[in-house]
Image (tube, rainbow, N blue to C red):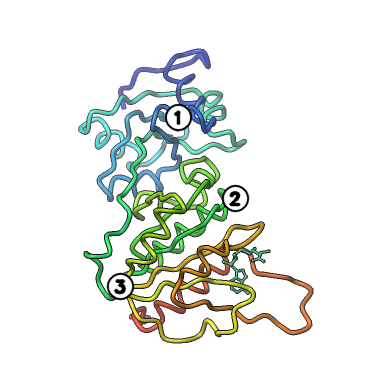
Amino acid sequence: MDLPHLTSLQNDHVKRARALDRRKERKESGLFLAEGAKVIATARDAGWPPETLFVDRDKAAGGIVAELVAWARRNGAACHSITPKIAEALSARDNPQPVIGVFKQRWAAAPDPARLNAGDVWVALEEVRDPGNLGTIIRTADAAGASGVVLVGTTCDPYARESVRATMGSVFAVPLAQLTHEGFLDLVRAWPGESVATHLAASTDHRRDYRGPVLLAMGSEGPGLSDAVAGACSVRVRIPMAADTGADSLNLAVATALMIYEIKRASLPLA
Ligand code: SAM
């Protein structure tokens, strides 16, 4: 691999990439960082080339990184070789990945109620706060074949490093949309299948059949689902917990996984 070699943390490419740790910078530039050959191969498979690729040549043994560089170059990306020190700074890990990419964010349109299929499951997250939870949910949505994730209101950033890491590449596969509360309530009202609120006060067991397309509404880690969203949905369900448990609720990502798999139960055979 014959790449321009960067050795200084003060290099402009390096400084711009490091700045993507700040949400303001990600918002203004519309860019984000993803690291690791496996994750970046997922981006390639999804047809999502990077704008810039950084490669630690000392660690980049094996053909996969060379393949990724060739693909990135063919798609117009700037590719640089970097020192282990720069790799550490870009990845903020002691043991950084040999390849780190700068990618343009993509936002999907919110689901159109007139264009849904019965098998569609969209996951709506109201005011999700924890990027680790958000990334885990995106990964689960991908694994179970959900149609996409809608972020409702003010949420954490799916393109934050912690979220991207937790998706393990699924950030490149799952459509992500954003809606205000008002926009989401309009979507709920127009939804042709069941809109499902998950709520600790619900009296319906979540283990049931769902009429698709399904819009699954999950609440935030702190206060849970707002009354407005819970009241607008066509059904409210609860995941049972042991009578003598001291836990007052399940973790958001765990509850979302249980819900998606229950909704998808009949259409996810172990083929
Ligand atoms: N204190 C919050 C409340 O009273 O709703 C708990 C929020 S919980 C950590 C985050 C979200 O996970 C909830 O809003 C709900 O969507 C989901 N959740 C967690 N445990 C649940 C359960 N047992 N049944 C249904 N949904 C649950």
Against 234, residue 90 (above or below) is: above
Q: Ligand 1 closer than 8 Å to the CB at disc 1?
A: no
* Mark 3 and mark 1: Cα distance apart in space: 50 Å
For the point 46% across and 26% down, which residue is it?
17
What's the distance in space between the residues labelled 2 and 3, CA to CA? Answer: 30 Å
Quadrant location, the N terminus: top left
Residue closer to the observer: 168 or 6:
168
Residue picked out by circle 3:
192
Q: Earlier in the sequence, mark 3 or mark 1?
A: 1
Q: Amino acid at mark 1?
A: Asp
Dot 2 or dot 3: first in sequence order is 2
Q: Identify the image quadrant of residue 186.
A: bottom left
Crowd class of label 1 (few under 14; some 14 to 19; many from 20; radius 10 Å): many
Q: Nearer the viewer, mark 1 or mark 2?
A: 2
Q: Is residue 165 left or right of residue 13?
A: right
Q: Which residue is mark 2?
A: 130
Circles 3, 1 touching at the beta carbon (< 8 Å): no
Per the image, the residue denoted by label 1 is 56
Q: Is residue 71 left or right of residue 128?
A: left
In the rendered view, tell whether residue 179 sits above or below residue 112: above
| Secondary structure state at the residue bearing disc 1 | loop
Q: Position of residue 38 (x, y in %)?
A: 40, 48
Residue 172: give x, y in percent of width and height: 35, 49
* Neighbours of disc 2 within 10 Å: few (<14), some (14-19), many (20+): some
Q: Residue at x 27, y 34 (%)?
A: 72
Q: Residue at x 36, y 35 (%)?
A: 103
